[in-house]
Amino acid sequence: MGLPSRPVAGSRRGGVLILGGTAEARALAAELVPSGMRVVSSLAGRVTRPRLPVGEVREGGFGGPDGLARWIAAEGVERLVDATHPFAERMSASAAEAAALAGVPLLVLRRPGWHEGPDDRWRRVPSLRAAAEELDREFPGGRVFLTTGRRSLPVFAGLTSMWFLARSVDPPEPPVPANTHVVLDRGPYTVEGERALIGGHRLDVLVTKDSGGAMTSAKLVAARETGLPVIMVDRPPPPAGVRLVESAGEAAAWVQAG
Ligand code: NAP
């Protein structure tokens, strides 16, 4: 079933389109809606029960950059904010291309990544595939805390000697590694809760993406406190030449200045 569109789509034109699916996108909508400006948030429609922003909401892909450019033109959208997750690489590329096609200004809102502290034991890797190779090399037979998202499990499916605690919002898509225990949960998480998972399941290593933000950072604190090694997947770079900010407040100022 589709998400409700509030108010009925088509009753207003213009305003800002926020490509969302993140806490920052919801915070931006919440900052802009009180001004009376038309604010449309777009969600991919992948999560069963998404957290909804205030303002109008639409759901589902646009059909690539051409489709997004057509949607922008049809709705008279004046500004585009790409506030998708730092790992939503295809949508960000599509937004940059569509903004150029439609001739609307684009801003990328991307929260900062995480940084390693002196007591952390991180290894940075460039991709999920590289994370799987690192596990295979350094942790054979190990017990792995995997928090890279439900659609990433096929990358680890060949690691049959390991045991995985895989946490995701919705059930993972097959194929999954042979020895996988799934925990369905969504942030924010607490350090106490993460410590209990690490100790309770006798985990040897955490694999995570450098998503950044406070909602899911408790696992890194717990890993530091318990001496757990972390394999950290680097984020893809943003599209070349885009204007970039790191907070909803900065993005709201940019939208309102237009
Ligand atoms: P992706 O691989 O970059 O995007 C794949 C396709 O999904 C896009 O080409 C687009 O389809 C559609 N899409 C993605 N985001 C959309 C949006 N906000 N509104 C409308 N269509 C969207 O994206 P992903 O990594 O699957 O992420 C999907 C959504 O989940 C994003 O909105 C992202 O903010 C959120 N999210 C992602 C992660 C993550 O780790 N990747 C984590 C938390 C939340 P068309 O080409 O047909 O337009």
Image (cartoon, rainbow, N blue to C red):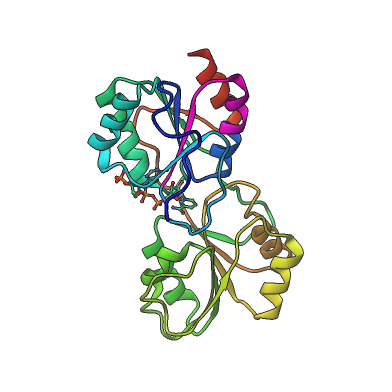
Total marks placed:
0
| Residue 179 among magenta residues | no
| Left or right side of 213 for 82 | left
List x then y, in percent, for residue 189: 68, 59
How far across and how far down the image is residue 156, in percent? 40, 73
Relative to 40, does residue 90 appear above or below in the rendering?
A: below
Horizontal side, residue 203 vs residue 40: left or right? right
Q: Residue at x 57, y 49 (%)?
A: 51
User: Residue 55 appears in which quarter of the rendering?
Assistant: top right
Q: Nearer the viewer, residue 95 or 47?
A: 47
Q: Quadrant of the N terminus?
A: bottom left
How far across and how far down the image is residue 145, in percent? 56, 71
Quadrant position of residue 105: top left
Residue sitting at x 26%, y 30%: 70
Query: Which residue is found at the position 66% from the left and 55% from the top?
Result: 188
The answer to whether residue 124 is seen in the rendering is yes
Q: Nearer the viewer, residue 17 or 238?
A: 17
Q: Residue furthest top?
A: 257
- Image spot of residue 68 (x, y percent): 30, 35
Q: Nearer the viewer, residue 192 or 26?
A: 26
- Above or below residue 30? Residue 187 is below
Residue at 39% over, 58% down: 127
Residue 247 showing in the rendered view? no
> For this rendering, which residue is in front, 42 or 203?
42
In the shown orientation, is residue 205 left or right of residue 70? Answer: right
Q: Is residue 218 above or below residue 144?
A: above
42 in relation to 203, above or below: above
Name which quarter of the figure residue 10 lies in: top left
- Which residues lie in the magenta part? 29-43
